[in-house]
Image (cartoon, rainbow, N blue to C red):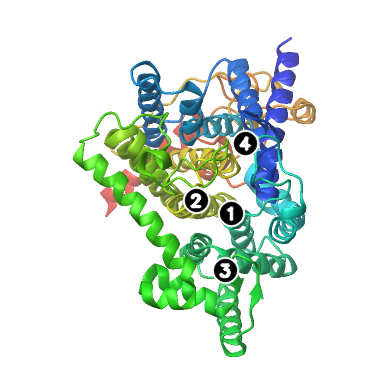
Amino acid sequence: MDALRTDRSANTSLLVARLLVFVVLGYWAFGKAFAYLGLYPLYIGEVVLAAGLLYLIHRGTIPVPNQALFWLYSVFLLVVLGQASYSVLVHGQPPLEVVRNLAVVYYGLFAIITFVLITRFAGSNLYRDVLERWLPRAAPWLLLGGTISVIGGIFLASSLPKFPLTDSVSVLYYKPTDAVMPLVVLLALWLRGYLTTRWMIWTAGLLAIAAGRSRSAMLAVGVAVLAMVWRPTKRMLQMMAIGALLFIFLLVTDIRVDLGYREVSARQFLANISSVIGSDEAASGLDATTTRNKDWRAAWWDAIYNDAVDNARIVVGLGWGVNLADHFGFQTEASDVNALRNPHNALLGILARGGWLAASLWVAFYLFLLYGLWQATRKFAGDRYRQDMAWAVMLYVLASQINGATDVFLESPQNAIPHWIVVGIGWALIRDAQALALPDPGKPPRVLPVPDPPVGSGAGIGRPRTPALAAQLAKARPCPSLALDGDRGTCGMAPRSDHVCLKLDGAPVGTAWQEHYCLGAHRACPHFASEAASAQPRADARGATA
């Protein structure tokens, strides 16, 4: 019965994991058009979120990461939910509008679902499979979807049918800040050698279109490249040299590719750069839309900030049911479900609706997240796949924050859901990195009495037990409790009954094995404690001899 229950649990976990992969690839390939699958207010993202929450209830317990950022998000969520209740009960704001505006917060539940799934599959070659197999195989399909969105969303938008209850969202839709996110991932994969150059050429063309049409997308790509400079490779130097030559070529020849709203040309890139770091006059002379949009956003942001300062909105803001475009007088022509409601800056939107308390928790969360990912890239120096995954997650979060600072980005499901799924991966990576810390040398390690489980029982913490793994364990011998260096078999550890910690042939001995496969539980492994206990007397002897 236990084995049957374990198999069912594994099948459920695999189903939910496939759902998450499906929606991420759909959002990456088709953006807003994929997000509108369904019928307002029930779209595909909400359906998958409900499935994920049912999965958490089905599991019964949630492995809580011992991380400050996890508790920061939990406090942030509770504070905002309290504010939302206050908005409805005291201010009388529409509940449906409150729920819609809370999307920037409650989509964070996808991070918890993702973290639980990764914990469920701990010990597997998850990160290696993602980097070497899944994303490279998905790359051509993502690029094809992005190209179809460019053609349909830019050149055929007026002739394509629209989604129900909308007057502006066609069945193919292109938005550069949405489209640039998977391209940043593919760029990072290519720079680290996981993606072939032929796909990178296609990626570069789509990056040029996104960067030409959006300064935010251009900044996201620029920051990603600058962040990767910290880990220089031959491919990076080649890319920078080729990019510089292409820009000089466009500048000299003055070639322009008209994309309707904006063009792809050296002139347009100069206008984008000038509007960000240069003078508005110079940018306006190259492209008047850059200065006009910049001034419109700045005026709205100033109004929100001045209102928050003048009215001392510390604990509660305007409320989560307020349409900020209507309230501050920046509404556009749209009047249906697609009416503008967010100020093109996630942080200022939270400040306006939730006050200084909610905004401070939001900033603290992302500071802890980025710091934890940065530390993870350093601690995973001996683990290529986790280190590269940590870098990719950090780049993705940085790019998301850049887009979220100038666009309605983290409030939209096509961006928020992939973003929070990636954050969930970041939580798991930070958890693994924290587990690599050695015990305090001033304190003797505590050897935990862990009984040897029967062969093939699957007791322990590690990767999920599958029928194939169970067959392998039936032929394997359990390792002696305190024989680390001489054993390359299977280490079964209590207390879980549905996981095992499998040591592969040729795997490194010493604490590196626990770091790679026990995934945070290596402190409880008797091997780890035994190795640390034997190392301490040797260190003391060396100190006495010296």
Query: Marks 2/1: CA distance?
Result: 8 Å
Query: Which residue occupies 69% across, 49% down?
Result: 30
Query: Which residue occupies 73% across, 16% down?
Result: 3
Amino acid at the residue labelled 4: Gly
Mark 3 or 1: in front is: 3
Query: Which residue occupies 36% across, 44% down?
Result: 348
Q: Please tell me how crowded label 2 is: few (under 14), some (14-19), or many (20+) other residues with Cα within 10 Å.
A: many
Q: Which residue is mark 2?
A: 400
Secondary structure of residue under mark 1: helix
The tag earlier along the polypeptide, 2 or 1, is 1
Amino acid at the residue labelled 2: Ser
Q: Which residue is mark 4?
A: 123
Query: Marks 4/2: CA distance?
Result: 29 Å
- Residue 114, image x, y percentages: 58, 34
Secondary structure of residue under mark 2: helix
- Residue 248, image x, y percentages: 56, 86
Q: Please tell me how crowded label 3 is: few (under 14), some (14-19), or many (20+) other residues with Cα within 10 Å.
A: many
Q: Which residue is mark 1?
A: 181
Residue 58's quadrant in the figure?
top right
